[in-house]
């Protein structure tokens, strides 16, 4: 039976006012500006961010996800503003407790969390997510992350963190170090979640940039300019300028199905190749 998307859920909306400024220890600053408008909205759909290494893609996602910024981790004093469903992150009275509630109830951040290696996968689920008793029962008290391969750990971490009940997913290089079988598994999880509660997806993947830009199902949204300033004592300031392109697919179901077919074929090809005898 096909899944039915819950259209009664409150729609997710991020509103970002530029310039958006983030500082670390008053020495390092990154400033994001938009080429299109001083106000940007991210609503339902699949948003792909592309740019060179060090362009600020992960930092920008961390600011949206409340893990960096005025009430986030490591960074202080952001100017501009970000609001999720009208909850402005820098409004008076907004605090770490409210930020944590939004993260825990609304956001999946992958791979923000990491395993506790000495304990079982069941205990890891309880610690890292623990929101669904039925899902918890699918993990074992006898299985330990430090006895699994890197790919197996990545798959288990996906099972633990990627929660179809949460409407926003931040995915920073989720396909890294995955073989074709596990990539297929990932796209199946994403499609299943989007058919249910998931509404808004932010995605970074260095290998898919050209594919997304040439895909007619994706539209160009904006180019962000990220200017970095590193001002250390007794040294001239280091100033850099990088760019982040944002593309969007407002109805990504067909895209998910295509990726599932592609990875399914690649997985079958890998399996057939592994079954071939060695040539003498």
Image (cartoon, rainbow, N blue to C red):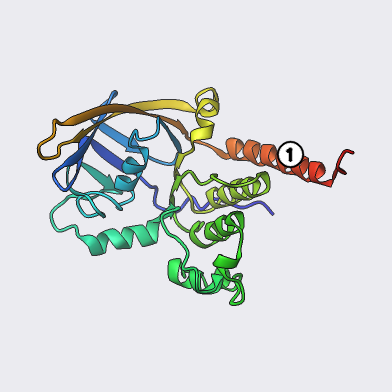
In the image, 120 versus 230, the foreground residue is 230
In the image, 42 versus 118, the foreground residue is 118
- The quarter of the displayed image where residue 262 is located: top right
- The quarter of the displayed image where residue 60 is located: top left
- Residue found at the far bottom of this picture: 141
Instruction: Look at the picture and state if 127 lies above or below 191.
Output: below
Residue at 53% x, 59% y is 157
Q: Quadrant of the C terminus?
A: top right
Q: Position of residue 59 (x, y in %)?
A: 32, 42
Q: Position of residue 22 (x, y in %)?
A: 21, 42
Instruction: Look at the picture and state if 49 lies above or below 24.
Output: above
Secondary element at image label 1: helix
- Residue found at the far left of this picture: 234
In the image, 135 versus 208, the foreground residue is 208
**Across the whole image, how many numbered discs are drawn on residues?**
1
> Does 150 sit left or right of 82 as displayed?
right
Q: Position of residue 112 (x, y in %)?
A: 41, 55
In the image, 30 versus 47, the foreground residue is 30
> Does 101 sit left or right of 181 as displayed?
left
> Does 182 sit left or right of 145 as displayed?
right
> Does 258 sit left or right of 216 as displayed?
right
Q: Position of residue 235 (x, y in %)?
A: 13, 34
- Residue found at the far right of this picture: 280
Residue tagged 1: 265
Residue at 44% x, 66% y is 128
């Amino acid at each position: 039976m096909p899944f039915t998307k819950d259209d009664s859920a409150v729609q997710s909306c991020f509103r970002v006012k530029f310039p958006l400024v983030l500082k670390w220890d008053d020495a390092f600053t990154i400033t994001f500006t938009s080429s299109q408008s001083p106000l940007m909205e991210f609503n339902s759909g699949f948003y792909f961010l592309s740019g060179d290494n060090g362009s600020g893609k992960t930092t920008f996602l961390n600011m949206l996800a409340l893990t960096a910024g005025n009430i986030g981790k490591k960074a202080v004093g952001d100017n501009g503003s970000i609001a999720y469903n009208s909850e402005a992150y820098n409004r008076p009275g907004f605090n770490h407790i409210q930020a944590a509630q939004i993260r825990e109830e609304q956001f999946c951040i992958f791979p923000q969390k990491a395993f506790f290696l000495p304990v079982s996968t069941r205990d890891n689920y309880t610690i890292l997510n623990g929101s669904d008793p039925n899902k918890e029962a699918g993990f074992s008290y006898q299985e330990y992350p430090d006895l699994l391969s890197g790919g197996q750990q990545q798959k288990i971490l996906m099972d633990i963190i990627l929660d179809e009940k949460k409407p926003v997913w931040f995915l920073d290089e989720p396909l890294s170090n995955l073989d074709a079988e596990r990539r297929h598994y990932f796209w199946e999880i994403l499609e299943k979640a989007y058919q249910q509660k998931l509404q808004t997806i932010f995605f970074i993947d260095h290998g898919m940039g050209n594919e997304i830009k040439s895909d007619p199902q994706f539209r160009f949204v904006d180019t962000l300019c990220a200017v970095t300033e590193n001002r250390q004592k007794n040294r001239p300031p280091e100033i850099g300028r990088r760019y982040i392109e944002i593309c969007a697919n407002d109805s990504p179901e067909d895209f998910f199905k295509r990726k599932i077919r592609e990875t399914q074929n690649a997985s079958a090809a890998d399996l057939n190749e592994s079954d071939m005898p060695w040539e003498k």
